[in-house]
């Protein structure tokens, strides 16, 4: 058996037998390399979690001798915590940005009111401002929004007023248009009781000058822009997005057309830039390097990005060059393997001062696992986002159905939310995207599994939304043209992101049938 230590493979096979998927373990598909090499030469076993791994492939002429591959994997919670602490703080200095350019950025300082809101007593409705009890004599003139301070009202006097207009001094209430009538002598009568202060927004009702409206680390949303403008701001102090670069590895990958002659379509090149954008990064380049150790070395050492994300090559097969390259440049491995399925060969390394690399497995769902395990918490720190202030979140939900667990590792399983319960989706093998495309989140299933009704943590899936007016939308502009031979595509276009909202995919009824049986769905690689 290839692609995983024999002990884990036997345990996985036993679980597959329990679930009626024996045929999934009869062929190559059930044991493909965990870094998406189903059509390339068989890979060596990845680093063991509970037993020594086989030696890595012989080094190239330019690479130093590899160090022993055996190492202790990091638990899933510890890996996320380590990634969050990998950087000491935001990767950029605060800058003042005009409001129209601040959308999607992170506040570098608390948002403090520069004035009272509202800054004067205003009418909440169209009607009449009245003084004292009625009936009232109505003035001939009226008060509109934006007009100067009106004359004071006397008791028994009223004046027409528009929503948002300044309340005249000594007015006691606003009588709505539909709640009053005038008689043939032009006197105003109330059709219901009038309470003092009725339909008047007093000065400072929302906030007083100097009040803290939002903390540093908050995400600048459209509503935040509106609040900032109302509070008197023309620009905001923010952290710029950390820059990220994606390196797509693998000679077997196609960028267009149908899979053919042992070649497969690259799913990660189109998927990762908008996802990274949703996590707070500005993706500056996507490079396809193939299985070229020298090209990988040159790309990493020449990159100036805060975060480099590689796809595939994180195991110890003959064309898995990530570990040898990191050793060659003297990188510091912070996480080298995580006890999670899918995606356990993921890694996090410090490759320079303030620069990090996240190595994702090449299988698509395994790469998503690595992205949310390591890249998301790191980017949260680099972007200066405070915990709980926008961006991806976690919550708990009861499972509608039980989920088989890995004997030792955490599992991340695509789920859809229905009736406040998490419904596990099929098509959840490490190479499959069909389940995650219809999911609202990833359920965190502890070792040993979880029964129906158990509350589990769910990772939110914040799909990317193109920014407004910045010219930095993720997606098409990054991967819409030829990207090969290590040539980078600029991200300065206005390509759209993925999806049109901040929520996840359709309800489970619109995706795979609940009862579908898919070979290999309980494989945990």
Image (cartoon, rainbow, N blue to C red):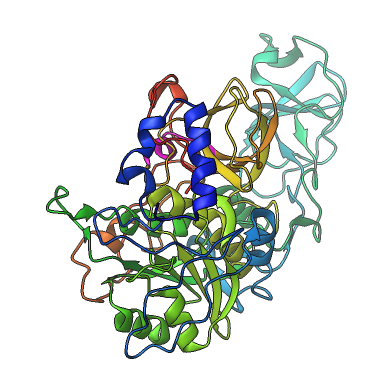
Q: Does the magenta stretch include residue 413?
A: no
Q: Can residue 69 be seen in this view?
A: yes
Percent position of residue 387, x then y: 70, 56
Q: Quick one: 306 or 188, which is closer to the camera?
A: 306
Percent position of residue 438, x then y: 42, 33
Residue 432 lies in what quarter of the image? top left
Looking at the image, which residue is at 62% across and 33% down?
162
Residue interval drawn in magenta: 433-441
Looking at the image, which residue is at 52% across and 71% down?
242
Looking at the image, which residue is at 38% across and 48% down?
31
Residue 35 lies in what quarter of the image? bottom left
Percent position of residue 86, x then y: 65, 72
User: Would residue 438 be found to the left or right of residue 141 on screen?
Assistant: left
Q: Quick one: 90 or 29, which is closer to the camera?
A: 29
Q: Quick one: 335 or 171, which is closer to the camera?
A: 335
The answer to whether 390 is drawn above or below residue 503 in the figure is: below
């Amino acid at each position: 058996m290839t692609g995983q230590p024999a002990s884990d493979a036997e345990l996985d096979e036993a679980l597959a037998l329990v679930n009626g998927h024996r045929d999934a373990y009869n062929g190559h598909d059930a044991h493909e390399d965990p870094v998406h090499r189903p059509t390339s030469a068989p890979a060596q076993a990845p680093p063991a979690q509970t037993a020594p791994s086989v030696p890595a492939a012989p080094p190239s002429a330019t690479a130093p001798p590899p160090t022993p591959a055996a190492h202790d994997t990091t638990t899933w919670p510890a890996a996320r915590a380590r990634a969050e602490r990998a950087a000491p703080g935001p990767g950029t200095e605060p800058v003042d940005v005009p409001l129209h350019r601040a959308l999607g950025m992170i506040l570098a300082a608390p948002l403090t009111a520069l004035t009272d809101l509202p800054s004067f007593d205003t009418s909440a409705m169209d009607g009449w401002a009245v003084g004292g009890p009625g009936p009232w004599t109505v003035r001939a003139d009226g008060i509109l929004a934006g007009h100067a301070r009106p004359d004071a009202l006397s008791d028994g006097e009223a004046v027409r007023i528009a929503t948002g207009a300044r309340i005249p001094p000594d007015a006691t209430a606003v009588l709505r248009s539909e709640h009053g009538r005038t008689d043939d002598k032009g006197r105003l009568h109330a059709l219901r009781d009038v309470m003092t202060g009725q339909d008047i927004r007093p000065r400072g009702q929302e906030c007083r000058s100097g009040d803290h409206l939002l903390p540093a680390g908050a995400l600048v949303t459209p509503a935040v822009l509106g609040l900032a403008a109302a509070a008197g701001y023309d620009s905001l102090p923010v952290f710029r997005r950390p820059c990220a670069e994606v390196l797509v590895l693998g000679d077997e990958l196609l960028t267009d057309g149908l899979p053919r002659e042992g070649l497969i379509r690259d799913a990660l090149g189109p998927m990762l830039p908008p996802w990274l954008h949703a996590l707070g990064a500005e993706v500056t380049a996507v490079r396809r390097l193939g299985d070229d150790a020298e090209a990988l070395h040159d790309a990493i050492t020449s990159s100036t990005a805060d975060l480099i994300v590689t796809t595939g090559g994180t195991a110890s097969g003959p064309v898995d060059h990530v570990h040898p390259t990191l050793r060659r440049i003297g990188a510091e491995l912070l996480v080298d393997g995580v006890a999670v399925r899918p995606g356990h060969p993921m890694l996090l390394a410090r490759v320079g001062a303030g620069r990090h690399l996240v190595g994702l497995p090449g299988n698509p769902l395994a790469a998503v696992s690595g992205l949310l395990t390591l890249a998301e918490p790191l980017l949260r720190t680099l972007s200066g986002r405070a915990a709980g202030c926008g961006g991806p979140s976690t919550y708990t939900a009861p499972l509608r159905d039980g989920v088989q667990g890995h004997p030792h590792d955490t599992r991340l399983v695509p789920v859809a939310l229905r009736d406040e319960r998490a419904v596990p989706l099929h098509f959840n093998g490490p190479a499959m995207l069909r389940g995650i495309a219809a999911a609202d989140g990833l359920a965190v299933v502890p070792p040993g599994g979880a029964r129906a009704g158990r509350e589990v943590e769910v990772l939110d899936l914040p799909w990317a939304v193109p920014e407004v007016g910045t010219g930095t939308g993720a997606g098409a502009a990054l991967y819409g043209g030829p990207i090969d031979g290590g040539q980078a595509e600029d991200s300065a276009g206005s390509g759209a992101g993925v999806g049109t909202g901040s929520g996840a995919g359709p309800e489970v009824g619109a995706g795979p049938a609940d009862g579908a049986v898919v070979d290999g769905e309980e494989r945990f690689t």
